[in-house]
Image: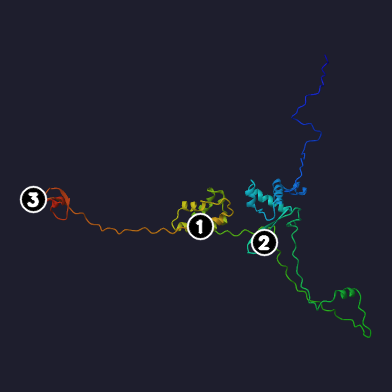
Amino acid sequence: MAEKKPNSVPRRIHEVRRTDTPSGVTHVRAHQPDRFTVVGNHLAQHPMLSLTAIGLAAHILSLPEGAPVDIRSLAERFPEGRDRIAFALRELETHGYLRRVRERTESGRIATRTYAHHLPVHVPAVPGPAAAPRARRPVSRPSRDAQTPPQEEDRGAGRAEPAPTGMTAVPSATPAPEAPVVAVSPPPSPARADQPDPPPAEATPHPRDDRAVALLAGLRRCDDRLTLSRRDVYRLAPAVTAWFDVGATAATVIHTLTAGLPTALESPAALIAYRLRNQIPLPLPEPTVLPARPATAPHPMRNCDGCDRGFRAPEPGRCRDCRAAPATMYAA
């Protein structure tokens, strides 16, 4: 018998392929004669863009001309929410792959046109507080008649002009008067674009609107999308108070403002203002008051002369039943 070798070749595992290349991606390429999009490596391998922004840019580059690429259309197409899509669009704008410009159409409406750049364009950086542009001080210049040509100024600097032939140069005792310079105060420095506008002064609500303010501030308990700012609450409070003045209850106002909300709610304050303005009910009619009957004293109790039954009557006599009976029943 042959001797068994301890270093025999192990059995091959058919499920695992043997390779000499390191681990990583292996491209399986195929020829695509049509329906393909060329995307540069500067976008697909961008070191600062998020994966959502890179994928969204590739999708936008693959769309035909005129396809809608607004936030609402992209949110209906992809499972990502509106916030992630809006953040990705801002990334592409920051790095020069996207540019959104508001333009006026022939009908007079304002539309947003989106320009998708296959190559990134240079985006000028917004200057910070240290690099803010310095306002130039305007200087008033003399009129054209009082100015001398620049060639003559350069030629006469540092040396005297020779006198013409036949004439004697007379030195001037006083220098030629210069053109007056008007001092102009510098204009106020323009506000930088990176600074937000100052917040408007918030009006103090009227004490009569306290109930309306509490109702509007609590709408977010019914739907998170109905979260209103302090300014919107104070602005809409008088309209809710008008509903209370016509007899509407708090439950009626809440049902009117929260029922049948649209799926895409962009401006909750505008929707609430529209419903408060157009769906206010009529005031309740005043209740009809019936005239009060005059108070009369009841008749005294009497005993019937025929059956000796008690009844009320203004005068003694017979009761109603005895009066309706034949007179022969009571004959002696």
- Per the image, the residue denoted by label 3 is 328
Quadrant, the N terminus: top right
Circle 3 packing at 10 Å, graded few (<14), some (14-19), many (20+), is few
The relative height of residue 17 versus residue 44 in the rendered view (above or below) is above
Residue drawn 15% across and 50% down? 321
Residue drawn 62% across and 49% down? 76
- Residue 207 seen in this snapshot: no
Q: Closest to the observer: 219 or 97? A: 97
Locate residue 228 relative to residue 84 in the image: left or right.
left
Q: Earlier in the sequence, mark 3 or mark 1?
A: 1
Q: Which mark is residue 95?
A: none
Q: Which residue type carries mark 3?
A: Thr
Circle 2 packing at 10 Å, graded few (<14), some (14-19), many (20+), is few
- Per the image, the residue denoted by label 1 is 276
Circle 1 packing at 10 Å, graded few (<14), some (14-19), many (20+), is some
- Per the image, the residue denoted by label 2 is 103
Q: Which residue type carries mark 1?
A: Leu
Image coordinates for residue 215, horizontal then vertical, percent: 50, 52
Q: CA distance from mark 2 to mark 3?
A: 111 Å
Locate residue 175 relative to residue 267 in the image: left or right.
right
Q: CA distance from mark 1 to mark 2?
A: 33 Å
**Residue located farthest toward the left when viewing the structure as drawn:** 332
